[in-house]
C-alpha cells in the first residue's frame, strides 16, 4: 500500500492518478507555456541523456560509499542502503555541500538539455539558481505538502522547479506527487503562499497529511513511475509532496530539484553566487 508520511494513499481514480506527459508538445514554447498555465506542471518522459543522468547518480553514490552508507553486497549503482553511516565522524556540512556541488551533477542541472528546455519553455534566455537540492531519501522518509514559493519567493514568482530522478524512482521508492489544480487555489496562494520561511520563521510544510490536504483542497494526487531521463517541471504554486520510501530492498531514492527563471528577471539572492547563503539569513 502506498503511504505518505505514514498516511495511506487511496489510489481510487477519483482521488489519485498519473501525471499527464507533455512529450508531444515539448518543442513548442506556446504549448508548453499553455500547459503550465493549465496543469501547473509539465512532465516529460525520457528527454534527458541517460549517460548524463547516470553520471550524476554515480558521482553521488561514490560519495555515499565513502561514508559507509551503501551495502557492499550490492552493486554501488543499485543504491542499497547499509543502514549505517560514518557522517558523525566527519564535517557533515562540508559533506552535504560536496554532494550537491559535484561536476557531473552540475553538468546535468546547469548545462545542455535541462537549460535548453527552460530557454524554450520560458521563450528567452533562462538562468538557474546556483544552489541545487540533492535528495538522498532513505526508507521511511518523505517530504510534506508545500508550495516552493515559501522557500524561494524573493525574486520573480515566474520561477520553476525541475524535479529530476537520478535513476529510476518507482512508486514504492518515494516518488513525488503533485496535487491536481493546486496552482489555482487563489486563497491558499494569498495566505500560506505569501509566507516566507526565513522572514516568518515557519516550517515550510503546509501539511504532513496528504490525504487530509486533498480532502480540503480537492483534486487528485498525481504521480508516476519515474525513470532516469524524465524531467518534471512545476510552478512555485503547485502543491507537492512525496510518497514514503518503502523500498523492499532498502534502496535510497536519489533525485534532484533545481530552479529556473528568465535571466532578465529579479532573482532570490539567497540561492545564487559562488556560495549561496541559503536559509539562515532573514
Ligand atoms: O524530492 C522531494 O522529496 C522533495 C522535492 C521538492 O520538494 C521540490 O522539488 O520542490
Image: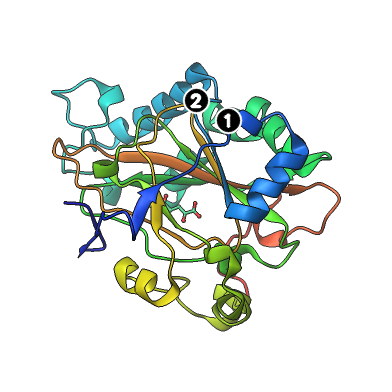
Identify the residue at image location x=40%, y=77%: 216
Q: Residue 192: percent from the left, percent from the top?
A: 54, 79
- Mark 2 crowdedness (10 Å alpha carbons): few <14, some 14-19, many ≥20: some
Residue 23 circle label: 1
Is residue 27 shown to the viewer in this render? yes
Q: Which of the two residues, 40 or 259, is positioned nearer the viewer here?
A: 40
Counting the numbered discs, the total is 2
- Mark 1 crowdedness (10 Å alpha carbons): few <14, some 14-19, many ≥20: some
Q: Quadrant of the C terminus?
A: bottom right
Display coloring: rainbow
Q: Which quadrant of the figure has residue 167? A: top left
Residue 46 circle label: 2
The answer to whether residue 217 is above or below residue 224 is: below
Q: Dot 1 lies on which element?
A: helix
Q: Residue 177: percent from the left, percent from the top?
A: 40, 53
Is residue 274 shown to the viewer in this render? no
Amino acid at each position: 500500500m502506498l503511504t505518505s508520511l505514514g498516511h495511506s494513499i487511496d489510489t481510487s481514480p477519483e482521488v489519485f492518478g498519473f501525471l499527464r506527459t507533455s512529450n508531444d508538445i515539448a518543442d513548442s514554447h506556446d504549448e508548453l507555456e499553455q500547459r503550465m498555465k493549465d496543469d501547473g506542471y509539465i512532465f516529460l518522459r525520457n528527454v534527458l541523456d541517460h549517460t548524463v543522468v547516470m553520471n550524476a547518480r554515480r558521482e553521488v553514490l561514490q560519495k555515499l560509499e565513502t561514508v559507509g552508507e551503501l551495502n557492499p553486497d550490492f552493486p554501488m549503482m543499485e543504491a542499497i542502503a547499509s543502514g549505517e553511516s560514518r557522517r558523525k565522524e566527519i564535517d557533515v556540512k562540508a559533506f552535504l555541500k560536496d554532494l550537491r556541488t559535484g561536476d557531473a551533477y552540475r553538468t546535468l542541472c546547469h548545462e545542455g538539455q535541462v537549460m535548453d528546455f527552460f530557454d524554450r519553455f520560458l521563450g528567452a534566455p533562462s538562468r538557474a539558481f546556483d544552489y541545487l537540492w540533492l535528495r538522498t531519501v532513505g526508507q521511511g522518509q518523505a517530504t510534506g505538502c508545500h508550495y516552493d514559493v515559501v522557500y524561494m519567493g524573493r525574486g520573480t514568482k515566474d520561477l520553476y522547479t525541475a524535479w529530476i530522478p537520478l535513476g529510476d524512482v518507482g512508486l514504492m521508492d518515494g516518488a513525488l506527487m503533485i496535487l491536481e489544480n493546486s496552482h489555482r487555489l487563489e486563497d491558499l496562494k494569498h495566505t500560506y503562499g505569501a509566507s516566507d520561511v526565513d522572514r516568518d520563521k515557519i516550517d515550510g510544510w503546509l501539511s504532513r497529511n496528504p490525504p487530509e490536504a486533498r480532502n480540503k483542497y480537492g483534486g487528485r494526487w498525481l504521480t508516476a513511475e519515474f525513470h532516469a531521463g524524465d524531467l518534471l517541471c512545476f510552478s512555485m504554486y503547485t502543491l507537492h509532496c512525496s510518497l514514503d520510501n518503502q523500498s523492499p530492498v532498502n534502496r535510497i531514492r536519489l533525485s534532484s530539484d533545481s530552479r529556473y527563471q528568465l535571466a532578465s528577471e529579479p532573482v532570490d539572492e539567497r540561492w545564487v553566487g559562488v556560495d549561496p547563503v541559503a536559509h539562515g539569513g532573514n
